[in-house]
């Protein structure tokens, strides 16, 4: 017999509900601000170089745990969503990040840190189901408002509404597999490879990395690097035998097989519920 879900008898206090909503929006806006700003500075992999201390290690531990939840319909989000709220302040105030970007947004570092500390205090109280008084709620509104004003109200609202996440990794692995098969056939027949745009958008993506996937995608990179080289080879009339010789010299069949095996492993790791 299926278990019934428990019936909700009481709703949360209105002060806690508003506090949670404010903090959810704030935290989301800050994560998205970090993603947007760091990528502008250093590209899609900026978080690898811009996380201070051991935060990259903490992220890798967190994403490894999250991968175990894929069978529950897990939504793969940007790496910065796997760090805790206090870590966001560390990233923002670390010297290169503050000097190159966030100082111009938030002004004085000591004022920003003091405001953030108050937000952390209230966030912990909300997270542990402690009752939020009307006075504390008003204080929270004030502190959130300070950060929203610094970012700019319209930008803040836009950031709070974003959710940077990966596409369906399982489905994307299948698409890359199909591209690998079609390009390998084209190379084997000395035909023209028409379109590598799917790979171009994948190779530098923040999620197509070993630390996120839990699988080293290097064989996939190696295969498509070879295919891209194939597209640059001269194709004078009668050059078919030279193209075939090239595929043998670079061991393209073996490279292709390794890429297919890797993509299958990625698909299995990120398999989805039917």
Image: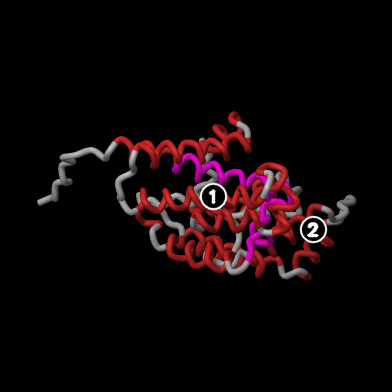
Q: What x and y, as percent, mark residue 193?
A: 73, 48
- Mark 1 → mark 2, Cα distance in angstroms: 50 Å
Residue 148: which quarter of the image? top right
* Image side of residue 161 versus residue 21, left or right: right
Q: Is residue 252 above or below residue 12?
A: below
Q: What residue appears at the point 44 percent right and 52 percent down from the top-left corner?
A: 121
SS assignment at label 2: helix
The secondary structure type at the circle numbered 1 is helix
Residue hosting label 2: 229
Farthest top residue?
154
Residue wearing tag 1 = 116
Q: Which residues are magenta?
A: 23-52
Magenta run includes residue 2: no
- Residue 203 image point, x, y percent: 67, 55
Q: Is residue 41 magenta?
A: yes
Above or below residue 261? Residue 32 is: above
**In-front residue for pair 189/116:** 116
Q: Determine whether, in the image, residue 125 is placed left or right of residue 12.
A: right
- On screen, residue 132 versus residue 103, left or right, reads left
**98 or 111, which lies in front?**
111
Q: Main secondary structure of the magenta part?
A: helix
């Amino acid at each position: 017999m299926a278990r019934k879900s428990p019936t909700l008898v009481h709703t949360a206090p209105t002060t806690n509900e508003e506090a949670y909503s404010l903090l959810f929006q704030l935290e989301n806006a800050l994560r998205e601000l970090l993603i947007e700003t760091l990528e502008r500075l250093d590209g899609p992999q900026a978080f690898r170089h811009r996380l201070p201390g051991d935060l990259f290690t903490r992220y890798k531990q967190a994403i490894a745990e999250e991968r175990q939840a894929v069978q529950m319909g897990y939504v793969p989000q940007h790496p910065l969503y796997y760090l805790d709220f206090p870590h966001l302040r560390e990233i923002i105030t670390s010297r290169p990040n503050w000097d190159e970007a966030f100082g111009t947004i938030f002004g004085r570092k000591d004022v920003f840190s003091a405001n953030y500390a108050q937000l952390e205090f209230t966030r912990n109280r909300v997270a542990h189901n402690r009752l939020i008084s009307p006075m504390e709620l008003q204080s929270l509104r004030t502190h959130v408002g300070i950060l929203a004003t610094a970012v700019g109200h319209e930008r803040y609202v836009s950031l709070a509404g974003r959710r940077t996440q990966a596409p369906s990794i399982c489905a994307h692995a299948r698409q890359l597999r199909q591209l690998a098969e079609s390009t390998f056939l084209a190379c084997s027949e000395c035909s023209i490879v028409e379109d590598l745009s799917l790979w171009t958008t994948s190779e530098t993506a923040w999620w197509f990395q070993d630390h996120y996937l839990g699988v080293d995608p290097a064989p996939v990179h190696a295969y498509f690097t070879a295919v891209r080289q194939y597209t640059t080879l001269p194709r004078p009339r009668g050059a078919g035998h030279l193209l075939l010789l090239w595929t043998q010299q670079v061991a393209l069949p073996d490279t292709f097989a390794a890429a297919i095996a890797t993509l299958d492993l990625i698909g299995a790791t990120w398999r989805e519920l039917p």
